[in-house]
Image (tube, coloured by chain):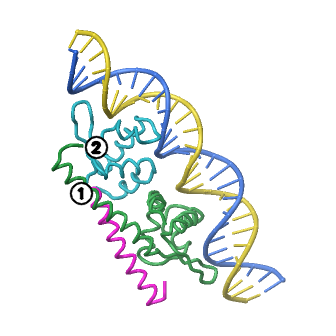
Chain colours: A cyan, B green, C yellow, D blue
Amino acid sequence: MAYGIKIEALAPPTRRAIFERLAAGPSAVGALAAGLPVSRPAVSQHLKALKDAGLVVETRRGTARIYSVDPKGVAELRDYFDRFWDVALDAYKRSLEGGDA
Amino acid sequence: MAYGIKIEALAPPTRRAIFERLAAGPSAVGALAAGLPVSRPAVSQHLKALKDAGLVVETRRGTARIYSVDPKGVAELRDYFDRFWDVALDAYKRSLEGGDA
DNA sequence: TCTATAGGTAAGTCATGGCTTACGGAATAA
DNA sequence: TTATTCCGTAAGCCATGACTTACCTATAGA
């Protein structure tokens, strides 16, 4: 899955807060909303965006939906920035050595 | 510097495109704009956002402003997702073992 | 079956911000 | 000094999206 949609999904502060809480452990929608200054539907919409981005997975238990972070999604972002780090540092070193742009 | 502002800075596709081109090597504003479907002022505004986020540094050469990626900024993002990866995988393993949320 | 719980969806509001054109300022060349 | 190049800033337009309330669905328990 593309990394672009993942970065965009983590940009809104509220959505990033939801994601970081899920990183501490799986949670239901209502429990998440109870600890945030937004309504439950807002949390639901954010979770849909995170799920579409491949950052979160959903499991059912009774009437509840339990959301958890998808380690594969996090791995993709981490790998992306690892590659980015390599090319960035390489370009940085070249700019110091060569001097020409 | 906070990682939140960095993630938000990389969310807009055009701004991410600018940043990735800079990762390949330093560049002036006009050269960047020439290869993108937006105006030069738009590129200028994106560069300001990237600079404020600590992802890019600016140097002068004549009337030109040469922009380069700031490896320290990339490192911060990479480290953030590394930590995130650790806690996410840990929570994932706990959810498999314990079973209780 | 009836009720309560849990949560996704629809529709609408409103602020944010990405983009444009127009303008102003700073550094080189003549 | 005058002109040219390169770029940042201001102001405005307009689409995007984050949030709300209202409504509907589905599962569990009595």
What residue is shown at x 50% (from left), y 76% (from top)?
A: B27
Q: Which mark is residue A35?
A: none
Give how far apart the Cα atoms at labels 1 and 2 are.
15 Å
Position of C5 compared to A10: left or right?
left
Residue kind at label 2, given as amino acid type: Tyr
Does the magenta segment cover residue A87?
A: yes
Q: Toward the viewer: D25 or A37? A: A37
Q: What element carries label 2?
A: strand
Residue B28 lies, in percent from the top left, at: 54, 76
Q: Which chain is disc 2 placed on?
A: A
Measured from the top left, where is residue A80 in percent x and y? 32, 65
In the rendered structure, find residue A67 and report the number of the disc placed on it.
2
Answer yes or no: are tags 1 and 2 on the same subunit: no
Q: What element carries label 1?
A: helix
Instruction: Name the quadrant containing residue A46.
Output: top left
Residue matched to label 1? B90
User: Which segment is the magenta one?
Assistant: A72-101
Which residue is painted at 35% across and 67% down in the image? A81
From the image, state whether disc 1 or disc 2 is nearer to you: 1
